[in-house]
Structures are given as C-alpha cells and as structure tokens.
Image (cartoon, helix red, strand yellow):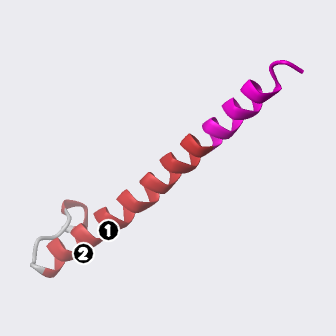
C-alpha cells in the first residue's frame, strides 16, 4: 500500500509519454505529407514514380 502512489504515477506518466509520442508521429506525418504535396505542386516528383 505504501507504493501505490508511486506505481500509479509511473503508469500515468508512461501513458502520457506514449500518447505524446504517438501524437508527435501523427503531426510529423501530416507535415511531411504537406511538404511532399508542395514539392509535387512545384513540379518536383518522386523518383519512384518515374518510369
């Protein structure tokens, strides 16, 4: 019972860190998609699409 607060705090902190990392990955993905769309709009294409 003495360690209940520490254990609960550790789980909560870990969950917040994991959620933060997931959100960061989602936000970064959206930024990269926008940047790629801007480059393609300027005429710079992907090498994988060249035939």
Secondary-structure class at tag 1: helix
Labelled disc at residue 18: none
Q: Which residue corresponds to the image point at 40% horizontal and 61% vertical from the top-left?
A: 27
Q: Which residue corresponds to the image point at 64% horizontal and 42% vertical from the top-left?
A: 15
Q: Is residue 15 left or right of residue 4?
A: left
Secondary-structure class at tag 2: helix
Q: Residue furthest front?
A: 2
According to the picture, the residue beneath numbered tag 1 turns out to be 33
Position of the N terminus by quadrant: top right
| Residue closest to the eye, 32 or 1 | 1
Among the 4 quarters of the image, the one containing residue 33: bottom left
Magenta stretch bounds: 1-15
Q: Position of residue 25 (x, y in %)?
A: 44, 53
Disc 2 from disc 1: Cα separation: 6 Å
Q: Position of residue 21 (x, y in %)?
A: 49, 46
Q: Please name the predominant secondary structure of the magenta segment in the image.
A: helix
Relative to 16, say whether 29 is above or below.
below
Q: Position of residue 40 (x, y in %)?
A: 18, 75
| Residue closest to the eye, 36 or 24 | 24
| Residue closest to the eye, 49 or 11 | 11
Q: Position of residue 3 (x, y in %)?
A: 80, 20
Q: Which residue corresponds to the image point at 20% horizontal and 65% vertical from the top-left?
A: 46
The stretch drawn in magenta includes residue 2: yes
Q: Is residue 16 left or right of residue 47?
A: right
Labelled disc at residue 37: 2
Q: Is there a contact, CB below 8 Å, between mark 2 and mark 1? A: yes
């Amino acid at each position: 019972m003495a360690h209940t607060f520490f254990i609960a705090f550790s789980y909560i902190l870990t969950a917040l860190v994991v959620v933060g990392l997931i959100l960061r990955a989602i936000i970064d993905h959206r930024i990269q998609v926008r940047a790629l769309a801007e480059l393609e709009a300027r005429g710079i294409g992907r090498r994988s699409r060249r035939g």
